[in-house]
Image (cartoon, rainbow, N blue to C red):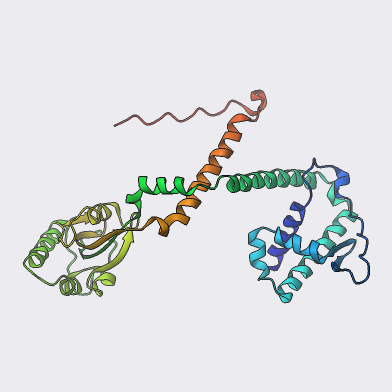
């Protein structure tokens, strides 16, 4: 963990440098900063080799670190700041030794610095596009209204009768039924329920889903995308309170009873929608940049681009 953090600190420190073309002289050691006057409100709090930082400079550095590193620092306490400063000092001293050995002028250093700079600036551009593309409340509400079905939730219970090949294990001393025999058993159980049988009691006694069966078949509340497609389709179409016809999935035959169906309100999901639209808008902006200035590649060296995949023919 310590080595990883040292590497991450090194990358973050590099990222503080102003963006400029990579030149050998850019890697020269920084000149020591002039010490503030005695009693300064912004004293020097960190010194490592020729590098000196005042309190405000150190705090600015920490504030602008990637979230992944700030999370590892462990909060804004003297102990956390000391741990970070000690490891920061090591990185700076190691880097100073590397410069003395001329490692900053090697082709490897220049190539990696070039790639890091381009990646950093591309990432900063994306962050700027995120900040510039926050959706209005009207846009988020319109999206919610158009996709309200996505936020439906169902409260349901079921009884599962497995058949051969199901990933659900066979209960002790239970016959491993074939698909048709399992269907016949499922239909018989449904008849009992339709005639007034207690769903919870029957689920506890008959369901091969041991987890929900022990709870009377209860599956709790779930939204779209949580269940296998055939189960979900039934759960969001079945009239409330009605016991479904047998529904087949890879697990076996299901009898489903929906107890309630609701939709999450706009205030409940607004933050989620805002984030989604903000990300989509930023990605569209980045795509526009990409389309407006594609790289030019010499085909005699790089070869011709691979042909685009043909669209699937409509069924």
Q: Residue at the location (50% across, 52% down)?
A: 275
Picture layout, residue 253 above or below residue 207: above
Q: Residue furthest left?
A: 195
Front-lying residue, 46 or 112 = 46
- Relative to residue 118, is residue 30 drawn left or right? right
Q: Residue at the location (35% across, 54% down)?
A: 151
Q: Residue at the location (61% across, 30% down)?
A: 292
Asked whether the viewer can see residue 60, the reply is yes
Q: Quadrant of the N terminus?
A: bottom right
Picture layout, residue 198 above or below residue 229: below
Front-lying residue, 257 or 142 = 142
Q: Which corner quadrant of the image does residue 296 belong to?
A: top right
- Relative to residue 280, is residue 85 drawn left or right? right
Rendered location of residue 181, percent (x, y): 12, 60
Rendered location of residue 145, percent (x, y): 36, 47
Picture layout, residue 115 above or below residue 265: above
Q: Quadrant of the C terminus?
A: top left
Rendered location of residue 98, percent (x, y): 85, 56
Rendered location of residue 124, percent (x, y): 66, 47
């Amino acid at each position: 963990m310590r080595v990883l953090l040292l590497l991450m600190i090194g990358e973050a420190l590099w990222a503080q440098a102003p963006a400029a073309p990579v030149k050998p002289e850019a890697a020269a050691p920084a000149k020591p900063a002039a010490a503030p006057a005695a009693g300064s409100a912004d004293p020097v709090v960190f010194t490592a080799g020729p590098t000196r930082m005042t309190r405000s400079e150190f705090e600015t550095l920490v504030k602008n670190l990637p979230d992944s590193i700030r999370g590892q620092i462990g909060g804004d306490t003297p102990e956390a700041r000391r741990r970070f400063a000690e490891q920061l000092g090591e990185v700076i001293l190691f880097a100073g030794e590397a410069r003395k050995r001329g490692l900053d002028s090697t082709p490897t250093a220049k190539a990696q610095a070039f790639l890091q700079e381009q990646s950093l600036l591309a990432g900063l551009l994306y962050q700027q596009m995120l900040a510039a593309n926050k959706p209005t409340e009207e846009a988020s509400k319109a999206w919610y209204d158009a996709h309200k079905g996505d936020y439906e939730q169902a409260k349901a219970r079921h009884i599962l009768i497995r058949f051969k090949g199901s990933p659900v294990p066979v209960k002790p001393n239970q016959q491993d039924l074939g698909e048709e025999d399992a269907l016949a058993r499922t239909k018989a159980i449904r008849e009992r329920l339709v005639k007034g049988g207690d769903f919870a009691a029957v689920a506890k006694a008959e369901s091969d889903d041991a987890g929900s069966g022990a709870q009377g078949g209860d599956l709790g509340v779930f939204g779209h995308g949580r269940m296998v497609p055939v189960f979900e389709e039934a759960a969001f179409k079945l009239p409330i309170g009605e016991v479904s016809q047998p529904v087949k999935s890879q697990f076996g035959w299901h009898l489903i009873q929906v107890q309630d169906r609701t939709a999450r309100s706009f205030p409940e999901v607004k933050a989620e929608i805002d984030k989604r639209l903000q990300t989509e808008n930023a990605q569209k902006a980045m795509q526009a940049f990409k389309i407006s200035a594609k790289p030019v590649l010499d085909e005699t060296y790089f070869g011709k681009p691979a042909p685009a995949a043909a669209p699937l023919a409509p069924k």
